[in-house]
Image (cartoon, rainbow, N blue to C red):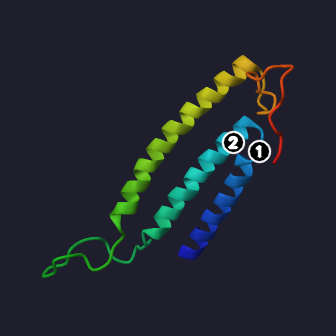
Amino acid sequence: MDYALAALSGVFFVAATYLLLSRALIRMLLGLGLIGNAVNLLIFVSGRLTRAVPPIVPVGETAPVLGANPLPQALILTAIVIGFAMFSFLLVLAYRAYQSLEADDTDKMRLAEPRGGPHPPMSY
């Protein structure tokens, strides 16, 4: 199961990279959200998924025998909250940019450049 979830995390990374390289602002935002989910899934897989034994200390023992590591789960919960706040802020920012510039394409959003002046390189 760990290999399948790690492969799914890799698929998420590939799809997020493809979306982030797009020129459309909404696709970039979706790629950013997808890459956050890929990182969360990767952290979750690294925390040893197990349902074999509940994390209860048996009688006569000082520590649980086997159990899921709670640290990656706490990190993921925090990352989900921060990622949602960042995504909602960037969504509002993109909507405001779309309202003022009336464009979703990043090439058409070059409003700060002078009309007669030299243009920046479009490719490298």
* Disc 2 packing (10 Å; few <14; some 14–19; many ≥20): some
Residue 22 is marked as 1
- Residue drawn at (71%, 17%) of the image: 100
Q: Residue at x 20, y 74 (%)?
A: 57
Image quadrant where one finds the N terminus: bottom right
In the image, taking residue 16 as reference, residue 80 lies left or right, namely left
Q: Is residue 93 visible?
A: yes
Q: Is residue 108 left or right of residue 39?
A: right
Residue 101 at x, y percent in the picture: 74, 20
The disc labelled 1 sits on which kind of residue?
Answer: Ser
Cα separation between marks 2 and 1:
6 Å
Vertical position of residue 30 compared to residue 18: above or below: above
The residue lying toward the viewer, choosing from 15 and 53, is 15
Please name the residue that numbered disc 2 is placed on.
Answer: 28
Residue 14 horizontal side relative to residue 71, left or right: right
Q: Is residue 11 rendered to the left or right of residue 38?
A: right
On screen, residue 80 above or below 89: below
Q: Residue at x 12, y 82 (%)?
A: 60
Helix, strand or loop at mark 2: helix
Farthest residue to the right: give it.
116
Identify the residue at the far top of this view. 100
The structure residue drawn at horizontal position 41% and vertical position 51%, both measured from the top left corner, is 77
Q: In the figure, residue 121 lies in which quadrant?
A: top right
Mark 1, Cα crowd under 10 Å, few <14 / some 14-19 / many 20+, is some
Dot 1 lies on which element? Answer: loop
Q: Does the CB distance between marks 2 and 1 fall below 8 Å? A: yes
Residue 91 on image: x %, y %:
61, 32
- Indicate which disc residue 106 carries: none
Q: Is residue 1 at all visible to an observer of this figure? A: no
Mark 2 or 1, nearer chain start: 1
